[in-house]
Amino acid sequence: MTLSIMIVDDDVVSRSMLHDIIESCGIGELAGMAEGGIEGARMIMDLRPDVVLIDLLMPDQDGIETVAKLKHGGYTGKFIMISQVENKEMVGAAYQNGIEFFIHKPINRVEVEHVLSKVNDQWKYERYVLEIKQSMARLNLVEAPAPAQGRTVRDAARSILMDLGIIGESGSKDIIALMEYAIDQKQAAEWPPLKESYEAVAQTYKSTPKDVEKESKAMEQRIRRTVIAALTNMASIGLNDYSNHKFEHYAPLYFDFQDVRMKMRAMEEDQAGDKGKVNIKKFLHVFYMETLEKMNS
């Protein structure tokens, strides 16, 4: 499904530029445009776009007020604020009212494409997690996930590790142990703090607090190296074949796609020291959801 985008801006030039960028970059499709906050709010509630690009300052109703009213009315899409104002108080108020990102005026094509790309990656990830949660709810597994007959946590986790190309990494055993512990404890869909997770698993085979602390720190390092290896593998696949099914599935799902592109660029430029940037908690959260899905598919 393609990201649907709405533009709310009283400046006709800005609307035209944003329209052209959306059409040319291929990240999403335009759902509609409005010249002011009141008209925009009405159209947004009717069209329910995934993302709204909204100007901060408009004569009839400013962007912050419009966003607040939309959220109060039940709209759950994402907002990107367009503004030439750099007042810290107004920026703070915008974030408090649910703004995800900012685009600065005068509008710059590179900045708009970059922000839309980040929002699109986030949207895809959230949709995927929501679909898994809905599937689990239908199977009555959200609060108490249980293995399906014939497929263990280890089997499901190993298949994902193999696809990511990290089955031989030392941290792969830690990832499997984390999945086994989380599912055995009937953990809910949200992933707990990393330190808490590492210590919980370490306590299953270490007897003293000192040993648990030491092992959890070692586990953290092993998992980080393993996740970085997965990022490197995905970036390598993407460089060779951008349409590879593993790259298309795993790269945007397990990593922020901007980080994947930066790693690909570093590899192209032969920057050997660049390890890449990874979000471990996101990686483990998605891994957990996919493990559950594979166990019950």
Image (tube, rainbow, N blue to C red):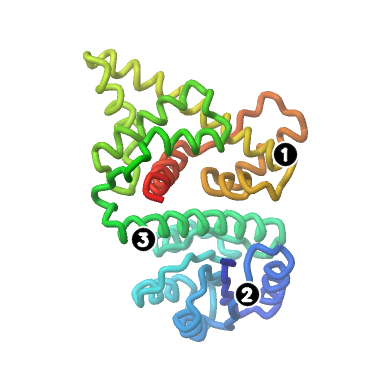
Q: Residue furthest right?
A: 269
- Are discs 3 and 2 less than 8 Å apart at CB? no
| Quadrant assignment for the N terminus | bottom right
Give the percent coordinates (x, y) of residue 228. 56, 31
Mark 1 or 2 closer to N-term? 2
**Above or below 119: residue 82:** below
Labels 3, 2: front one = 3
Decide if residue 199 is on the left or right side of residue 170: left
Per the image, the residue denoted by label 3 is 134
Q: Residue at x 62, y 75 (%)?
A: 30
Quarter of the figure with residue 22: bottom right
**Above or below 61: residue 243:** above
Q: Residue at x 32, y 32 (%)?
A: 197
Decide if residue 9 is on the left or right side of residue 62: right
Give the percent coordinates (x, y) of residue 223. 46, 27
Question: Which amino acid type corresponds to the residue marked 3 in the rendered image?
Answer: Gln
Per the image, the residue denoted by label 2 is 30
Give the percent coordinates (x, y) of residue 99. 47, 62
Give the percent coordinates (x, y) of residue 261. 66, 44
**Above or below 75: residue 134:** above
Task: Provide the secondary structure element on which disc 3 rests.
Answer: helix
Q: Residue at x 63, y 48 (%)?
A: 245
Per the image, the residue denoted by label 1 is 265
Question: Which amino acid type corresponds to the residue marked 1 in the rendered image?
Answer: Arg
Q: Residue at x 23, y 16 (%)?
A: 209
Q: Label 1 vs label 2: CA separation? A: 30 Å
Task: Provide the secondary structure element on which disc 2 rests.
Answer: strand
